[in-house]
Image (spheres, rainbow, N blue to C red):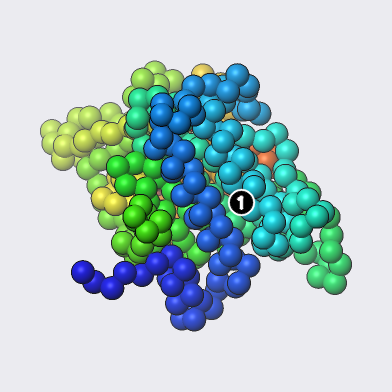
């Protein structure tokens, strides 16, 4: 068996080789990874752990919260409050930011997360996951310790210091980037450690697999409909090849498949709620996933611009997402440009 490299060893070696994982960032990543282990244990208990079902509350998105949504959120908050690496946190499950209590030291990073994405799949035992994004707290005046505010979180995804997800599936896997490629770690349940199982992950530029919720087809804008129709036309159509379709309804699972074997994932704007840019949240879903995909050589746009260039205006704002194999994302984006007469 080849020498096993743990998450800690990987981070120490990356710091030694490339120097962009300062101590506080390494601590942050290790704390998040440890919290994800606790979430994996709770998720894997299922009905045996009395964690199934709804919590009887709604989140800021107006979505019914599952018990595991709340549990996962609390695990991440408790794990990250005391370490001195964070100034504040933001979560899909919390209306406003959570500032590190005064009894703990404040750090220079901001942590954003969707604590349990895809939770509609919990009862049917389909992969779900935790998505996280790391930003640096802006410093107007480095000599002053300024209070943290929601405005500090409103940074384009290109400013992320790190991003990743943990997928709770047949294996629990942690997928991470600090801006120098994508690495994957598999949870060894016997030792409780995250073991490096893939690095320098690359998304093939072409694919024969697309992921979209086809039941929304009648609501799509023309460029998305054109792209999917061409995929469905297969070998006899303009693409000259047959395509396969997958839709897990768990972004973490769909993105993990794309990082593993290529593909394109789309949750586009549609006519159901014209004022809503899309379903997925920019800061703690689209930005971290787009950072990972780009670091693996893929592309991520909202149909009109690079997702990582979108300037956020609200903490929970949504965005249209087209990400994955570069040539396919560029095709769909070009169709949007053509439709605009670009
Ligand atoms: P639909 C899960 O609720 C989620 O936010 C993403 O993980 C997933 O890709 C999408 O929504 C699924 O949405 O409308 O197909 O159920």
**Residue farthest to the left, as pictured:** 236
Q: Quadrant of residue 188?
A: bottom left
In the rendered image of this protein, does residue 313 appear above or below residue 138? above
Ligand 1 within 8 angstroms of badge 1 C-beta: no
The percent coordinates of residue 230 (x first, y second) are 25, 33
Q: Is residue 151 shown left or right of residue 135?
A: right
The percent coordinates of residue 242 (x first, y second) are 16, 37
Viewport quadrant of the N terminus: bottom left
Q: Is residue 261 shown left or right of residue 44?
A: left
Q: For this rendering, which residue is in front, 310 or 97?
A: 97
Residue for badge 1 = 79
| Residue shown at the point (49%, 43%) measured from the top left | 39
**Residue farthest to the bottom, as pictured:** 16
Mark 1, secondary structure of its residue: helix
Q: Quadrant of residue 9?
A: bottom left
The answer to whether residue 302 is visible is no
In the rendered image of this protein, does residue 156 appear above or below residue 245? below
The percent coordinates of residue 191 (x first, y second) are 37, 59
């Amino acid at each position: 068996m080849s020498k096993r490299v743990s998450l800690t060893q990987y981070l120490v070696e990356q710091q030694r080789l490339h120097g962009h994982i300062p101590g506080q960032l390494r601590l942050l990543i290790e704390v998040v990874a440890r919290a994800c282990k606790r979430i994996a244990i709770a998720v894997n208990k299922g009905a045996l752990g009395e964690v199934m079902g709804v919590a009887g509350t709604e989140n800021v998105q107006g979505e019914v919260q599952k018990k595991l949504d709340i549990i996962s959120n609390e695990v991440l908050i408790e794990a990250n409050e005391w370490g001195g690496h964070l100034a504040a946190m933001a979560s899909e499950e919390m209306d406003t930011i959570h500032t590190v209590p005064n009894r703990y030291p404040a750090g220079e990073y901001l942590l954003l997360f969707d604590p349990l994405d895809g939770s509609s799949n919990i009862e049917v035992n389909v992969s779900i996951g935790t998505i996280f994004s790391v930003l640096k707290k802006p410093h107007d005046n480095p000599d002053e310790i300024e209070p943290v505010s929601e405005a500090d979180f409103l940074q384009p995804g290109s400013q992320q210091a790190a991003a990743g997800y943990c997928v709770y599936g047949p294996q629990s896997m942690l997928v991470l980037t600090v801006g120098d490629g994508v690495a994957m770690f598999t949870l060894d349940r016997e030792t409780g450690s995250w073991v490096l199982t893939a690095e320098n992950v690359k998304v093939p530029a072409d694919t024969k697999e697309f992921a979209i919720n086809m039941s929304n087809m009648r609501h799509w804008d023309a460029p998305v409909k054109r792209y999917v129709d061409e995929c469905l036309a297969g070998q006899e159509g303009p693409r000259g090849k047959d395509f396969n379709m997958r839709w897990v309804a768990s972004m973490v699972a769909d993105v993990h498949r794309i990082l593993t074997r290529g593909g394109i994932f789309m949750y586009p704007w549609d006519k159901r709620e014209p004022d809503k840019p899309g379903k997925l949240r920019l800061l703690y879903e689209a930005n971290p996933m787009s950072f990972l995909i780009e670091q693996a050589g893929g592309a991520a746009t909202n149909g009109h611009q690079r997702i990582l260039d979108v300037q956020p205006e609200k903490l929970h704002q949504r965005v249209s997402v087209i990400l994955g194999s570069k040539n396919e994302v560029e095709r769909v984006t070009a169709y949007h440009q053509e439709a605009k007469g670009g």
